[in-house]
Structures are given as structure tokens and as C-alpha cells.
Image: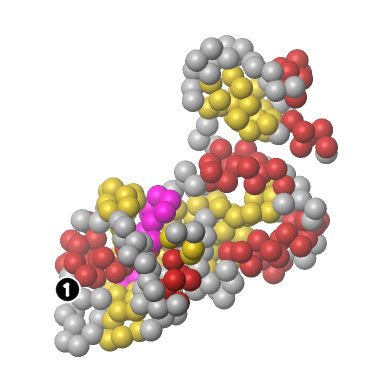
Amino acid sequence: MFGLLNIEKPPGLTSRDAVDQVQRLVRPWRAGHAGTLDPLATGVLIILVGPATRLTEYLHRYDKEYEAQFLLGQISDTEDVTGAVQPLCDAPRPTEAAIQGAAALLVGEIQQRPPAFSALRVGGRRAYDLARRGQPAALPTRPVVVHGIEIVRYDYPLLELRVRCGTGTYVRSLGRDLAESLGTGATMSRLCRTRIGPFPLDQSVALSRLSSAEEVANHLHPPHTAIQGLPTVTLDARQARDLSFARPLTLAVDPQSELAAVNADGELLAVLAYRPTGTWHPAKNFIAAHEAS
């Protein structure tokens, strides 16, 4: 139980609900997710199992792809159809060319204001908890990266977009800002995450198919798939033994900030961090996981 699951999350469940279902199957191993999906949303949800939960931060570095559906000419307090939806009077009907032009201005590093109904913490409390109590927080804007926005279909009021973006981007807020720049509003009616880095939706497994620990194990991806962007070094038996005692390693490799250390079989042993002393130290050490197995 050391790896990652590429789950297809169904609608109606929170990301925590999905993790809890896996957690019940793999106890006493831990499980966690990398990248929240709202109950409305479907698609790729990466669940990390066992020691792989310590690799969550690396999955956040991967870009994500979404397919989103919006209804123009209306607004919602949640920015999607789960909230209080309000039609706008005399809302303009932008042309597809106008939408393309406005979308182009939202590509790159932009400042985005997160939705009031979000999981961000404000004074130690979730923003959505405050919003549900009628005390929505004024969340500050923050930088996010949008790599591309493509119009998939436009049949007013329906607008479908394909979005490629970095971590932390709220797609429903992207639709909000796009519509506001055109003098109208938008409410997200559907969202599907189609990819996280090397994990596409067409290679995901339905949560309902996981009914036992054996089924989970059969669908686990190796833990090193979480850190494919890192250079890799293969350790010999002596170096692996030193690593088991957390001893610093001297490696004949160019200095990098981090390295993925594997054994001769390609199994992930550690994430190594470079020190100014010229040695490498384990930032994440997984030797114990292999010894336990």
C-alpha cells in the first residue's frame, strides 16, 4: 500500500468522502487526496495511499485540465448552480469572437479573487462556513497561472470551455471574470477535471469499482509517478543502506535542488535534497516502507 490512485470522482461526493471510502479499505494505512473537487464536480481525483501521502506537495506542481459548462446572463452566490441563482435583466449576448478575445486576456499569470464559497481558511475557519452563516469573507486576490482557455461549444446561454491551468485556480471564478469583462454574469453548471499532470481521465478507475484492499492494490500507480519532474539517481546497496540510517550521501551528479532516489528495480527510496556541504540528505525517506513490505 504505497502508491497513487487515479480515481474518477462521481458527482455528489466531496473529495473527503472519496478518501474516506478508500481509507476504510486500506486501514491501517493512511489515505489522502491531492486537489479538492467540489461535490458538483467530477473527474480525476488523485488519492495517495500509505507513505505516498508524503508526496502530496509534488502533485500540486502538475498542471490541470478541465472541461467546464457555464450559463451566461445569470449570477450565483456560489458561482455555480448549487447556490442561489439570479438571472440578470437585459444581459448582453456576447459574440463568440468577443468571448475569445476576453478569454485571451485571462491567459498567463493573473490575479484571481477566490469565490466566497471555497475551502480557503479565513481566521482558522473555512470560507464556505462563513458564507453559509451569512458572513462571506472578502478574500484577497492571489496569483494563478492559466495556460489556455478554449471554447468547446457556444449556444447562448450555454458556454463550454476547456481550461488548462496551474494549481489553485478556481474555474468557476474564471468563468465569473470572463463574463464580467463582457458586461454580463456566468454560473457554472458542470465541471469535469480531465487531467492532472500524467493522470488522464480515460485511465482513471471508478470509485465504485474499489470494493477491497486487493482492488486498491491492483490500481495503485508507483509512487515515483508523483515526482516525474525530478531528476532520478539510482542508488547501489551500500548507498541504500546509508540512506536507511539517514546518512548524507555523496553522489557524482550535478547539483540540483532535489533528486528522486530509486533502487535497481526502479522503486522510489527517497527524495533527496542538496546541501551546501556538497552532500545529499533525505527530504522524504521511504526506506522503511520497503523494509516493511
Crowding at mark 1 (Cα within 10 Å: few <14, some 14-19, many 20+): few
Is 167 in the magenta?
yes
- Tell whether 278 sits left or right of 159: right
Q: Which residues are magenta?
A: 157-170
Residue at the image point whose x is 28% and y is 86% from the top: 87
Q: Position of residue 236 (x, y in %)?
A: 72, 18
**Residue 45 visible to the viewer:** yes
Location of the C terminus by quadrant is top right
- Tell whether 25 sits left or right of 192: right
Q: Quadrant of residue 44?
A: bottom right
Foreground residue among 173 and 234: 173
Is 205 in the magenta?
no
* Residue extending farthest right: 292
Residue matched to label 1: 183
The amino acid type of the residue labelled 1 equals Gly
Q: How many marks?
A: 1
Q: Position of residue 63 (x, y in %)?
A: 44, 48
